[in-house]
Image: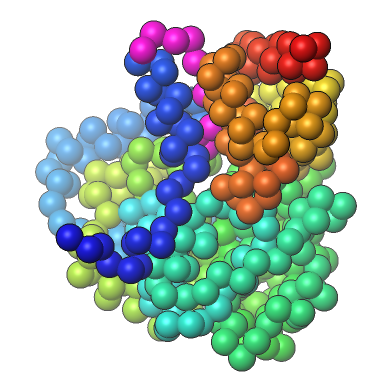
Amino acid sequence: MKLANRVAALTPSTTLEITAKAQELKAQGHDVIGLGAGEPDYNTPEHIMQAAIMAMKEGHTKYTPTGGLSQLKQAIIEKFQKDQNISYNQKEIIVCNGAKHALYTLFQVILNPGDEVIIPTPYWVSYPEQVKLAEGKPVYVEGLESNSFKITPEQLKSVITDKTKAVIINSPSNPTGMIYSKEELQKLGEVCLEHGLLIVSDEIYEKLIYGENHHTSIAQISPDFKEQTIIINGVSKSHSMTGWRIGYAAGNMAIIGAMTNLASHSTSNPTSIAQYATIAAYTGPQDDVETMRHAFEERLTIIYDKLIQIPGFSCLKPQGAFYLFANVSKAAELAGFDSVDNMVKAILDEEKVALIPGSGFGADDYVRLSYATSLSILEEAIERIQSFMNRKMNK
């Protein structure tokens, strides 16, 4: 049977593909170190799990409103008020089955065939695929390493056409870990306002910030920016709740209403007990969030210095998230490979270390390493990669 054109053109998720290969090798008995999947290695905090258990015991296991429980929407509203001093009402919030689903639903309701969405590179692997599924056209703008992988207002202006509908801003970024400053966001936002572009602000890593850096939401800069912005967020990264699948979107009431209508015919509602768990995540103690953030920062400090000692590896030190995005084009050359992708496959086969090639993020010369795992495992992975490079270079 012939598949629909919309899925035939999809590119499989590189992250999940490499992770599946690593799991296959593990099942065969190999000692595999996976630095691919983007999820914290901590379990969900205890008070959040207890809230889910209590919700089940109290019978909260039925359908909920499509757009999420009123109590959860209120907790999200209070979170925005406290963290960014942005005011929303409940009709401007939709709770979804993860931030990925929030993005998917957003593109489905804003894009018509041929509409363009500007996507800075390097990008999270699902952005272009979701745009294509909505019959839109991804338009790429290269965030140069010399500019910390961030795009400029001039670059943004240069690709705007009469078909441009939206631009995606992901700060802190997956895969680079870089953060847009308030001043940078201000300038990009002015271009978007001038051309009537919707700003899709993916802020899923907002709680994972290091050093003297801080997170600014473009929606908090001005009321005009807020009106033009849809914020995407969730508890997967901040509260180590990847498997609970709760994310949300906040913004223009008409867009949120359309997203809610679509969700009513696709998912009915997010999982009830996961919603009650998320209420506890946002209204309960936040100590575990800071404990996890501190651990990631400590790992980054140690492992970054080791990584850049590997021959042919160079890397900007990330400001947030939990990824290192290393330029390894020189390493591939030194090791005798014609592409970074082939080198990544060889490292997995020979050293049993799973990295994610940058080709999946629109940046062929790079690899992404997640440091959301223990320091001892990270150090072992670096030693194996170092051994691999030494062996290849000494052939």
Q: Nearer the viewer, residue 317 or 76?
A: 317
Q: Quadrant of residue 208?
A: top right
Q: Nearer the viewer, residue 330 or 42?
A: 330
Q: Residue 96: x and y, percent?
A: 35, 58
Q: Residue 124: x and y, percent?
A: 57, 52
Query: Quick check: 133 left or right of 388?
Result: left
**Boundaries of the magenta span:** 28-39
Q: Quadrant of the N terminus?
A: bottom left
Q: Residue 7: x and y, percent?
A: 34, 62
Residue plotted at (39% across, 67% down) = 133
Q: Residue 360: x and y, percent?
A: 57, 47
Q: Nearer the viewer, residue 47 or 100?
A: 100
Residue plotted at (78% across, 72% down) = 155
Magenta stretch: helix, strand or loop mostly: loop
User: Does the magenta run of residues contain 122?
Assistant: no
In this rendering, does residue 391 appear at all?
Answer: yes
